[in-house]
Amino acid sequence: MKFVDEFRDADLGRVVATEILGAVEPGRHYKIMEVCGGHTHSIYKYGIDDLLPANVELVHGPGCPVCVIPMGRLDDGIAIARNPEVIFTCFGDMMRVPGSEGSLLEAKAEGADIRMVYSPLDALRIAKQNPDREVVFFAIGFETTAPSTALTLKRAKAEGVPNFSCVCNHVTIVPPLRALLDSPDLRLDGFVGPGHVSTVVGARPFQFIPADYGKPIVIAGFEPLDILQAIRMILAQLAERRCEVENQYTRVVPFEGNRRALEVMAEVFELRPHFEWRGLGFISQSGLRLSNAYADFDAELRFSAPGVRVADPKACQCGEVLKGVIKPWECKVFGTACTPERPIGTCMVSSEGACAAYYNFGRFAREREVV
Amino acid sequence: MTVRDEERILEIIETARSKKPKFREDRINMAHGAGGKSTQGLIEGLFVPAFGSPSLEALGDAGTFTVDGVDLALTTDSFVVRPLRFPGGSIGDLAVNGTVNDLAVAGARPLALSLSLVLEEGLAADDLRAEVDAIARAAQAAEVQIVAGDTKVVERGHADGMYACTAGVGRRDPRAQLSPAGLRPGDRVLLSGTVGEHGTAIMLARGEFELGAPIESDTRPLWPVVDALLEAAGPSLHAMRDATRGGVASVLNELARASGVAMLVREKAVPVHPAVAGASEILGIDPMYVANEGKLVAFVAPEEAERALAAMRAVPGCEEAADIGEVRGEPPGMVLVETSFGGKRVMDQLAGDPLPRIC
C-alpha cells in the first residue's frame, strides 16, 4: 500500500533500532510514556517493544478513550439505554467495558436496543430513519473524535432532528498529562506525543511539558518507523540535555492545529468543571459537555440517569502504574481482584492497557528480558 | 517487592488461566457465538460436562466413533449468515462446505449430509429455489449426498429469511492419525491459502461501510487438499483445523492449548489478498482473526513438511499455500508472531465479537 508501506520498512526499522541502541547510556534506565492508545496499539501490533534495548521501557499512557470512562458514566449510559423508547448507539469497543452492574453487551442481551455504529453520523441516520424512537449517541474520545461529534450535532440542529441526543464523554488530553506531571513521584523521562490529537490541537498546547516540567515530548505518527524515530528523537534530547516539543509527524500535524475543527468544538462544547477518569480520579477541566446552544441535544438533560459516582476500589493503583512508579504486578489488586475478565482500573480494561498486557504476556516479556 | 514475589504473582495468573473456562453469565450475549473465550466457556463449562462423551471431550471439529469396526466421524453445524447471498457464495454453499470441512479436517471423507431448513414466512420462492440449487451444486462438488431433511416455517420477523442446519457423516481415513493434542515442537505450520476473504466479503456485502473491494468468499470443500496432505505426509500430519470463526489466530491458540506447546508465526509468510489487506487496514482489523470458509491449517513433522506443502499447492485453489511458522516447546499455550516489522508479539485469543453472524 502506497504511503503506508514506506513507514513499515523492516530494514529501515533495524537501522533506527541500531541508532537507538547507540543513543542510550549503558546503566541508565529510560521510561518513556506513549500518551495515545493509538501508539500503544501500533507498539503492540508491530512488536516495537521487542526492538528496543532492555533499558528503554515504554509506559502506556492514559490516552485510550474507552479505558478512561469511569463506571458511573457507563451505568448512566446503560440506564438510558434501558428506556424502551431509546435506541442507544456507541462504538463497538465500548460494548464490553464493565459498569458496576454489567456491560452494554449484557444490557443488550437483556433486551435493550443497543447498536454499534462506526461514526456519530450513522447514529444521526438511525435517528432520521426512526422518527418515533429516541436515538442516543454515547460519545467518547479525545480531541480526535470530538470534532466529528460536534459536526454531527451541528447537522442535527440544522436539520432539526428532535429525536437525536448525545451523552458527551469527550475528554481533553492536556489536563491528565498535567495531573501525571504534577505528581511528585513521577518516574518518566519523556513523552511520545499524541499524533491524532495534535492534528486537531496542534503542537502548541504541549509546550508546558518542556517549559514547566523539563521533559522532552515528540509528537509522532502511528506507523512503526514513526514511533521508533520519535523514541530516537527523545533519546537525542535527553543525551543533549535539551527539552522541547518536537514534531516527528510533520506530514500531518501543523504547529497551530486545525482551526476549523477547534472552532466547531468551541461552538458545540464547553468545559466541565471536573470529570472523573477511571483509575485517575477527578481531574479539573478535563471533560467536555454540550454548550448551552446545544442543550436540547444533551441526553443527560433529556433523560433521567442515576448520576451516581461509583468509586474505583481504593486498592486500585492505576495512577501509580501510569506514572511508572510501580509495575503492574506490584499493584495490590493485580491478578486477584482485578483481572481482564473483571477489570477494576483503566490499565486492565483494554487489552492494550499496561496491566492487561502484563497479565496476558508477563511471562513472555520476562523471558525476553533474560534472552 | 522482590523477584520472588513477581514469580508468585505470575504463578497465580497461570493457575487462573489454566482453569477450565466457566459459563457464569446470566444470559447469552453475542460474544457466546463468536468462537472466542466466551464460546469456549459455554462449550467447556456447560455442554461438555453435561454430555460427557469422550469424543466430545476431545473438542475436535467432528466427533469420532467406531461401529462394527468401521471408523466414522459425525458433525453438525447451523448457518445464520446475513445477508443470505454475498460475493463468492451464499448460505447454501456454506451449509454444505462448512459441514464437509469439519469432517475433512477430522481426517474423514465426507459421505452424506442431512439438511434442516428454518424458513421465514414471506421468503420469496425464487430465493429458496436459488439456495436449494446452491446446496445441490455444492453437494455435488463435495461428492456428498443429501440423504435426509426437515423443514420448519416461522412467523415473519424471525430467522431473517432462512437458517440452515446440516449434519454430516464421514468415514475416517486409515492414513489419518490426527489429534488436537498431537503437536510436537519442531512441527511446521502449513496454511492452505490466503486468509480473511470470507469475513471481509460478508462485512462489505452488508454495506455498513461505504467501501467497495473485489473480495469474494473463499467457501469451498477441503477434502481434496486433506486427501493430498494425507497422501504426502501420512502419520507425519499431526493435526488439522479449518480456520472459520475467529480465523487462523483462534485455530493456532486452540491447538497450542490442547497440545501444551507454543507456536511462532511469521507474519510476512502469511498470504493475504491485497484487497483484504487494504480493507483490513481501513477497518482496523487483523486478517488473522477474520473468518475463512475454505482454508485449513495443518501441523506436519518437519521432515515431511516440504512434501506436504508441495502436495497442497498442487490442489486447485491452494496454489498460495504457505509454511507460516513452527511449533515450539516454550512458552506452552502461547502463540507468538514475528511481525512484518521484525518485532515479536503475542497473538492472543479473540475476546470480543468483531463481526456477528458471518456463517
Image (spheres, rainbow, N blue to C red):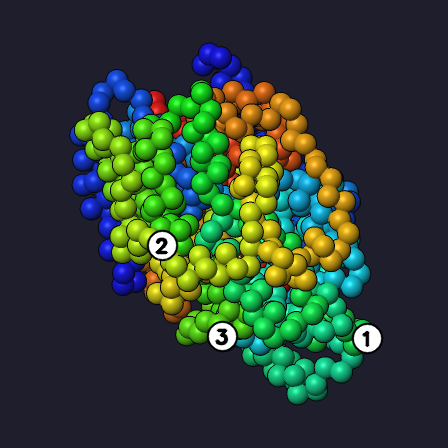
**SS category of the residue bearing label 2:** loop
Query: Label 1 belongs to which residue?
Result: B155
Q: Quadrant of residue B83?
A: bottom right
Q: Which of marks 1 and 3 is nearer the N terminus?
A: 3
Given the image, on which type of amino acid does mark 1 rest? Glu
Judging from the image, mark 1 belongs to the subunit labelled B
Residue at point 32%, 33% (across, down): A211
Q: Is residue A307 above or below residue A212?
A: below
The residue labelled by disc 3 is B88
Q: Is residue B345 above or below residue A335?
A: below
Q: Of the residues shown, which amino acid type is indicated by label 3?
A: Gly
As helix, strand or loop, the secondary structure at mark 3 comes to loop
Farthest front residue in view: A292
Callout 1 crowding tier (Cα within 10 Å): few <14, some 14–19, many ≥20: few
Q: What residue lies at 36% left-to-right and 54% top-to-bottom?
A: A257
Q: Nearer the viewer, residue B84 or A60?
A: A60
What is the spatial separation of the Cα atoms under label 1 and label 3, in whole angstroms? 29 Å
Question: Is residue B8 placed above or below A135 in the rendered structure?
Answer: above
Q: Residue A257 carries which label?
A: 2
For mark 1, give the secondary structure: loop
Looking at the rendered structure, the kind of residue marked 2 is: Gly
Q: Compare residues B42 and A209 and report the one nearer the observer.
A: A209
Tell me the CA gap for discs 2 and 3: 45 Å
Percent position (x, y) of residue B25?
Answer: 74, 43
Please indicate, yes or no, whether residue B185 appears anywhere in the rendered image.
no
Report the mark closest to the observer, 1 or 2.
2
Determine the CA span between mark 1 and mark 2: 56 Å
